[in-house]
Amino acid sequence: MGETGGSHAEVVGESPPRVGGLRERLLSWRDRLLGNPAFHRAAARFPLTRPIARRRARALFDLSAGFVYSQILFACVRAGLFDLLADGPRSTSAIAAATGLPEEGALRLLRGAAALRLVQPAGEGFWRLGEQGAVMLGNPSIGAMVSHHERLYADLADPLALLGGRADTNLARLWPYAAGERDAMAAAEVAAYSELMAGSQSLLSEDILDACGAADSRHWLDVGGGEGVFLAAALRRNSALRGTVMDLPQVATRARERLLQCGLAARAEAVGGDMFNDPWPAGTDTISFVRVLHDHDDAPARALIARAREALRPGGRLVIAEPMAGTRGAEAMGDGYFGFYLWAMGSGRPRTADELRRWVLEAGFDRCRELRTAQPMLARVLIAERDGEHDSEDVKST
């Protein structure tokens, strides 16, 4: 086999798809054209195609340089740069002294951050927050996620090695529940992932509830609900609503404390248990999975949907809220970011709304529809409904 920049073994017995039809011919022509350097030179010179050529060249460069950009953001978070600029402009020398960087290194970081709109110049030798930096400062949970990405970056240092197996990754050690190690989790492990999830969930809860509402619910069960951030948000929407959050016993303890601090303990409880094997609280008319299903492989994810169907009272509904593959305008976030993140975590995959809808109906729900959210790239919402006329008997714990 000749050297062609990476050998590819031919799979015995496998033949390529037959090329035929107008669409295949057009795609083949497109590929040949886009791979032709002469075409690129001509497109860059011709006035009508020049903007398109430049935009596509910039997109390809950004794709190849994306890791560098993310590391500039990571450095800003690690150095505490946004907090330093919270009260107004600071000089390069003051920033260097506060971050422990040499002035030349601080200036290089500031210029890179300015290129990404994280900071911006504020006069000769001074800097202030940029548009994106202001967003980072106002949402500390984003910074927590950026810091957390250090583990993901380490796992992606050799992406082909990562794709060759899902064992013993940095992310898997942070999320031991994903590998089924639910009983051996130390308090420090629980605190690390619970705090991270609680912080990021606060960004999404209101958007999800704006879509699905809480006014018509009487008892809400949030399965895999962590420290109860989402349930607390639902309870604040409806003063007559009662709620239960179910998660691992170590996490449920933290949820009780949070609900007490929020003044919601009289209307809410936290139940510790294994959502796959232990009984679920009975009598609920609303069950939610908020960023839960995509953490799990197909069989356990489908098992959770089936358990929700059995646990719901007749006439109840299931709320599924999570990032989904194939989201228009956010395709890279689905199969790109979450596809690789969940692979490194050791469990789960992003799924399309159509796939989840099919699973829900196969589990026995009568209807499933999608509700519009403000930020579909972060969470889309499916509502699955169970009719009441099919089941007159009380629903027992499952």
Image (tube, helix red, strand yellow):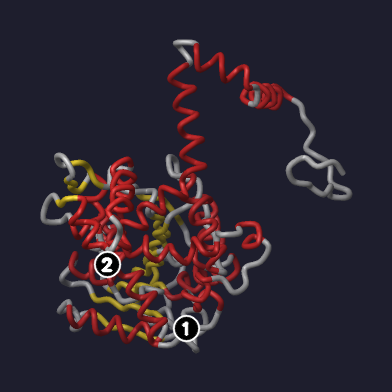
Of labels 1 and 2, earlier in sequence is 2
* Residue 102 screen position, x and y as percent: 30, 57
| Most distant residue in the top direction | 47
Category of crowding for the residue at label 2, using alpha-carbon neighbours closer than 10 angstroms: few (below 14), some (14–19), many (at least 20): many
- Residue 383, compared with residue 326, is above or below; it is below
The answer to whether residue 204 is seen in the rendering is no
The N terminus: image quadrant? top right
Identify the amino acid type marked 2.
Answer: Ser
| Residue 119 coordinates in the image, percent (x, y) | 24, 46
Residue drawn at the location 55% of the way across and 80% of the way down: 180
Q: Which residue is mark 2?
A: 217
Tell me the SS state at disc 1: loop
Please tell me whether mark 2 sits on a helix, a strand or a loop.
loop
Using the image, determine if residue 247 lies above or below residue 356. Answer: below
The residue located at (46%, 32%) in the rendering is 58
Counting the numbered discs, the total is 2
Which residue position is annotated with label 1?
A: 274
On the picture, is 11 further left or further right than 105?
A: right
